[in-house]
Image (tube, grey):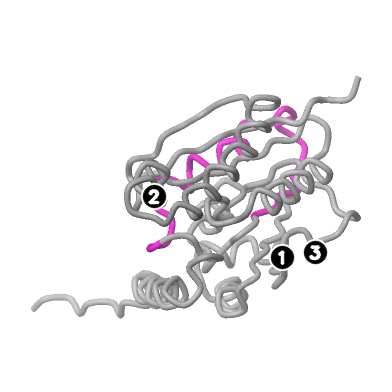
Amino acid sequence: MAAPQKPLQSTGIDSRLRDAGLFVRQAVRTFRATGAVAPSSRALGHALARFIDEREDPTAPLDILEAGAGTGAVSRVIAQHMRAGDTIDLVESNPEFAGRLAEQLTSDPDLSGIADGATVHQKLVTDMGPDVSYDVIVSGLPFANFTAEEVREIMEYYFSVLRPGGRLSLFGYLYTKQVKAVIAPREDFLRQARSGWVVEEWVNRYGVGTERVLANLPPAWIQHLRKPAED
């Protein structure tokens, strides 16, 4: 006699399916703020969590910021890399996503383990204010959908709250500029190009590594940056 199958929720599959459905619905309604057609892959999450593993002081806990946390696809992977004493601020401006993420802190097996050190903030990341500081920032914000002025404001904020020697990892999608050059209105293409130039300014000054993650929908690139240590 075959063993009875476990319910889907016990494996987390049912929860992931609900998150994916919520993500797609919100992406259709608010694509400018969402900027993707599917949640980020675990491969992308592991690459973004690189500097949670590569600590300058292996014994010191980290303060982490994830901007644009969505429904927690990358948050779950980050949680696997966190250690005792680490804290994380999960910032998400979409109220549907933020509410779902808050629920997951108590019900999701990956996130419940870090619940004591995690806080969900339903706001723009720049509204977190100046009275915070972080060792690692993971940015999931869709810069390609923002204006150059918005991107500059966010990058300036990141570097104002990063501690000296802190790391920032951000990502975008491969080939979107080339696609928009062919099919998008000219103003959309120019806006994305200007936003990309701002990111390039910061990468040229502070970049420490680039990665491609093909196991994502769409395939993605990651830029890793480091704030200089104080003299």
Looking at the image, which residue is at 39% across and 72% down?
Answer: 24
Magenta span: 37-66
Q: Are marks 2 and 1 in contact (CB under 8 Å)?
A: no
Residue 180 - label: 2
Residue 227: percent from left, percent from top: 76, 31
* Outermost left residue: 1
The numbered mark, 2 or 1, whose residue comes first in the sequence reads 1
Q: Nearer the viewer, residue 41 or 139?
A: 139
Looking at the image, which residue is at 46% across and 32% down?
Answer: 211
Q: Which residue is under mark 1?
A: 124
Q: Nearer the viewer, mark 3 or mark 2?
A: 2
Question: Disc 2 versus disc 1: distance between alpha carbons?
Answer: 26 Å
Looking at the image, which residue is at 64% across and 25% down?
Answer: 204
Q: Amino acid at mark 1?
A: Leu
What is the quadrant of residue 205 in the picture?
Answer: top right
Q: Nearer the viewer, residue 152 or 71?
A: 152
Disc 2, SS: helix
Q: Are marks 3 and 2 in contact (CB under 8 Å)?
A: no
* Outermost front residue: 186
Q: Are marks 3 and 1 in contact (CB under 8 Å)?
A: yes
Relative height, residue 191 to residue 23 (above, below) = above
Residue 131: percent from left, percent from top: 91, 55
Q: Amino acid at mark 3?
A: Asp
Looking at the image, which residue is at 17% across and 76% down?
Answer: 3
